[in-house]
Image: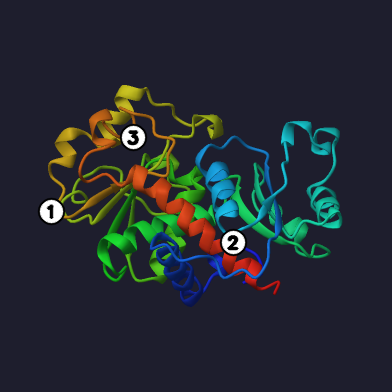
Amino acid sequence: MKNLFSMEHLTNEEILHILDRARAFENGEQSKLARSYNVANLFFEPSTRTKTSFEMAERLVGCTVIPFDADFSSAIKGETMYDTVKTLEMIGLDAVIIRAEEDEFYNELLEGINCAVINAGDGAGQHPSQSLLDLYTIQKEFGTFENLNITIVGDISHSRVAKSNATALTKLGANVRFLCPEEWAGQFEAHHSWDGLIQDSDVIMLLRVQHERHTGNKKFSKRSYHEQYGLTAEREAQMKEGAIIMHPAPVNRDVEIADHLVECERSRIFQQVRNGVYTRMAILETILEERE
């Protein structure tokens, strides 16, 4: 595994290897990397969790993190993604972690780039590191993915998290269902009400409503969305014993989920954040080991 672009490119064996290494890191094992590597985080879209999590993971596996500020880079002057990455490679970087608003930005980097490239989110395309930390969270809870009922709720068509998780969870044997307004289903067949979904869900995975990506689609008030599609207290009470709540965050409280449920006993929302550090350590180690 020399790069990480999309969950579609990973085999089940590669996924499970990363999850195994994440567990080892959580249990206190040290990185197997033989030397320090130079890495940079190229974030052309806002991020709190992913960017900071990668920075923490990079330091914990012994990398040297080279600062990069997209707002003060030559990208502002019109430099292409390829030229930016090639420049950093020539300076001596071994890996770049990139978030960009263009879907499949990495296609521009498939030829001519020798440093490792990790996709930290491409437009409304894929978010593989988030998917892997979600998988790790589910695996820790249930020990398996086979025949789990995973209900993904929200802005499906704009969600790189939904697409990444749908791909990976289905490959690993889970039953993935979608719930959203009809016009937000995108490429997926989806339910448009909670009927028949709550009681047998092992995982309810909520998604942020991405108002910034909506162009001409139906708008919902916070209250109306919460009433129709949000995880209310009444709906949470119908969840089966042992079922958990997930959300990639940032969370719109009292929109996707009732405020008091964000840190309830079922919620794994903040645990996902912690799991993200271990998972991204595993991603970095797995990819950088290829350079040894």
- Is 201 left, or right, of 286 in this rendering? left
Q: Earlier in the sequence, mark 2 or mark 1?
A: 1
Residue 284's tag is 2
Residue 7 picture location, percent across and down: 53, 63
For numbered disc 3, what is the local secondary structure?
loop
Verify CB contact (< 8 Å) between mark 2 and mark 1. no
- Going by the numbered disc 1, the residue's amino acid type is Glu
Q: Nearer the viewer, residue 206 or 183?
A: 206
Dot placed on the residue nearer the N-terminal end, 3 or 2: 3
Q: Residues within 10 Å of mark 1 (few under 14, many from 20)?
A: few
Q: Is residue 155 above or below residue 255?
A: below
Mark 2: amino acid: Leu
Marks 3,2: beta carbons within 8 A: no
Which residue occupies 46% across, 74% down?
Answer: 12
Q: Which residue is depicted at the point 70% across and 53% down?
A: 39
Residue type highlighted by circle 3: Glu
Q: Quadrant of the N terminus?
A: bottom right
For marks 2 and 1, give the CA distance: 36 Å
Q: Looking at the rendering, which quadrant does residue 140 occupy? A: bottom left
Mark 2 residue element: helix
Q: Which-is-in-front pick, marks 3 and 1?
A: 1
Mark 3 and mark 2: span between their CA atoms? 32 Å
Return the x and y of residue 87 as percentages of the image width and height: 85, 51
Q: Quick one: 250 or 62, which is closer to the camera?
A: 62
Neighbour class for label 3 at 10 Å: few (<14), some, many (≥20)?
many
Could you give the CA–CA distance between mark 3 and mark 1, rounded to whole angstroms?
21 Å
Crowding near pointer 2: few (<14 within 10 Å), some, many (20+)? many
List the residue tagged with mark 3.
256
Name the mark on residue 241: 1
